[in-house]
Image (cartoon, rainbow, N blue to C red):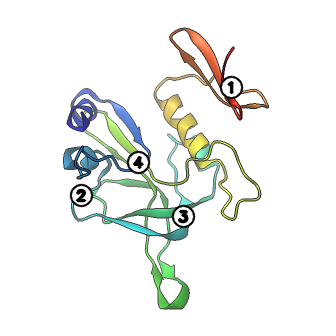
Amino acid sequence: VLRKIASWVREKGGRLLAVDRCRDLELEPVWEFDSLFGITPDSEDAWGHTGQSVNASADFPCIGAIKSIHAEHGWLGLAEGVEKIACAVERPGQSGTVIYPVSSLFRLKHGSGGEGIFYCGPLVLKRDPQALFADGGTFSALLSDVCAMSGVQPYGTQADEIARARIDGRLYALKDDGIHEL
């Protein structure tokens, strides 16, 4: 399945947003799929809390409105041509460590017009102002940008809703207490 998705992006110009790494049934990497995003066998998934500056292109106006994001991990050693939409700045860390220029939000465009967009930050849909590392709406902004690039129009939400979607002709809203048909 992952190889077929990779073919769709590479050959048919599909746009794919992945929210972390996918593996095969044996939990092994599928390099044809990972390479959609510029992840190579030599790339490193580096863990540790870090802030990352946002360097968004015009394709990402909602993400571009966010100046920096916080992530618990990101990638180093990505393939040439990868656009790092959010990236840490190399600097000294605590206790003699080094914070490397990891990226938790990046994309790779393909010759067919397809592109792989990869995000491995927090998947927060509702802001928690009391959270130690409060997210500034990164995933919601990213989803809005990718939907806009793909021609998907937002439905908007009401004050008590987390998200809305139309499925099989019916409109649904996700709220704190579950899914409601509207």
- Left/right placement of residue 126 relative to residue 20 reads right
| Residue closest to the far top | 169
Could you give the CA–CA distance between mark 3 and mark 4, rounded to whole angstroms? 15 Å
Q: Are marks 2 and 4 in contact (CB under 8 Å)?
A: no
**First in residue order: circle 1 vs circle 2:** 2
Please state which amino acid type lies under the numbered disc 1.
Gly
* Front residue (pair 81, 107): 107
Circle 2 residue:
40
Q: Residues within 10 Å of mark 4 (few under 14, many from 20)?
A: many
The residues tagged by marks 1 and 3 sit, at their Cα atoms, a distance apart of 28 Å
Say what amino acid the circle numbered 4 marks: Phe
Is label 1 or label 3 in front? 1
Looking at the picture, which amino acid does disc 3 mark? Gln
Residue 181 occupies quadrant: top right
| Residue toward you, 29 or 113 | 29
Identify the mark nearer the N-term, 3 or 4: 3
Vertical relation: 154 (above or below) 22: above
Q: Which residue is mark 1?
A: 156
Q: Looking at the picture, how far across and down is residue 144, in whole percent?
A: 57, 35
Mark with earlier residue (2, 4): 2
How far apart are the alpha carbons under marks 1 and 2?
37 Å
**Mark sitting earlier along the chain (2/3):** 2
Of callouts 1 and 3, the N-terminal one: 3
Label 3, on which residue?
Answer: 52
> What amino acid type should be assigned to the residue bearing mark 2?
Thr
Task: Report the disc number at residue 118.
Answer: 4
Q: Residues within 10 Å of mark 1 (few under 14, many from 20)?
A: few
Q: CA distance from mark 2 to mark 3?
A: 22 Å
Disc 1 on helix, strand or loop? loop
**Secondary element at tag 4:** strand
